[in-house]
Amino acid sequence: MTACCRVVEMRVVFVAYLLFIVAGLAWCLVVALVHH
Amino acid sequence: MRRFVKENSLSLFFGVLFLAALAGQSVAGWHQVNDQQVGESHDRITYLQYLTSADFAVDVTENWQSEYLQFLLYIVVTVWLLQKGSPESKELGKSGLESDRDQGVGAYAGDDSPRWARAGGIRTTLYSWSLGLVMAAVFLASWLVQSIGGWAAYNETRIGQLRDPISWPAYLVHADFWARTLQNWQSEFLAVGSMAVLAIYLRQRGSPESKPVGAAHSSTGVEG
């Protein structure tokens, strides 16, 4: 396994966590705005 | 695959726990709301209706904002504030932003340093604060969404009681908003303070959050 692939793996978990955060906030924001 | 799991086990473990706990919260919250609905002689709601309710949104975001506030404060105040004997503190005498040499930025950056650590100027300043800035952005966004979701949920309750809904600015100074906010903050502040203080005298063998088992109680900023 090359060092390049390991860097990509770290990016995968980094981006996955950012997506969790953004998707969760976006879902809750849309839901909250629809209900207000 | 096995190597990938091993080298990323910490983030995978918490990612799976997060999704499982969120799923559990959504199911338990749905049953809780339906229990209230039945108690008030209202129709039950579907699971999808609960997932798209203001109740679910505010319950999720009120916890998110407090967690991100906790880590934001921990990341930023530990730049300046110290705790003698704690592995969570920097060494005594290292309080502050430290020199470029200590931080390996600008002229002191290495060949494998991030590009923006080497670049100098505004890019290095921004990158030097990037973790705190992102945690602050997530905290503020979560708190904002909590306020909007809490406002909607609270007004739904008021309308059900045949009372006039209140405005968003009025909700921001309302007891419901601050009770939700502060009940989360108090627990986070106690937990994070406890971690810093209990680790002075207590140990967890092998944990980077603890000092080595044999480290002196007075040794500060040493990780196991």
Image (cartoon, coloured by chain):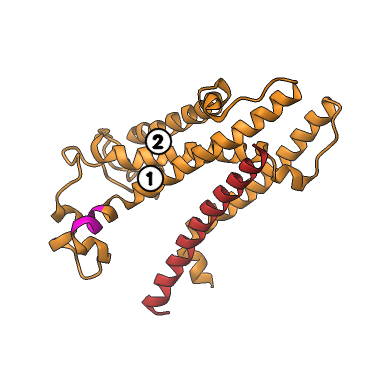
Chain colours: A red, B orange
Instruction: Identify the disc placed on residue B195.
Output: 2
Residue at image location 35% in from the left, 50% down from the top: B131
Tell me, yes or no, if residue B79 can be seen here. Answer: yes
Instruction: Mark 1 and mark 2 in contact? Answer it, CB < 8 Å.
Output: yes
In the rendered image, the residue lying farthest to the bottom is A2
Q: Is residue B61 above or below residue A9?
A: above
Query: Crowdedness of circle 2 by 10 Å Cα count: few (<14), some, many (20+)?
Result: some
Amino acid beneath label 2: Met
Q: Chain of mark 1?
A: B
Same chain for the residues at labels 1 and 2, yes or no? yes
Q: Which residue is mark 1?
A: B209
Residue B220 falls in which quadrant of the image?
A: top left
List x then y, in percent, for residue B81.
26, 34
Q: Is residue B155 left or right of residue B81?
A: right
Q: Residue at x 64, y 33 (%)?
A: B152
Judge by depth and name the residue closer to the eye, B8 or B26.
B26
Q: CA distance from mark 1 to mark 2?
A: 9 Å
Three-letter code, disc 1? Glu
- The question of residue B81 being in magenta is answered with no
Question: Which corner quadrant holds the N terminus of chain B?
Answer: bottom right
Residue displayed at 35% across by 31% down? B197
Q: Is residue B99 left or right of residue B179?
A: left
Give percent across and percent down for residue B149: 60, 37
Q: Is residue B9 left or right of residue B37?
A: left
Residue nearer the viewer, B45 or B16: B45
Range drawn in magenta: B121-125
SS at badge 2? helix
> In the image, what residue occupies the spot 86% across and 27% down?
B41
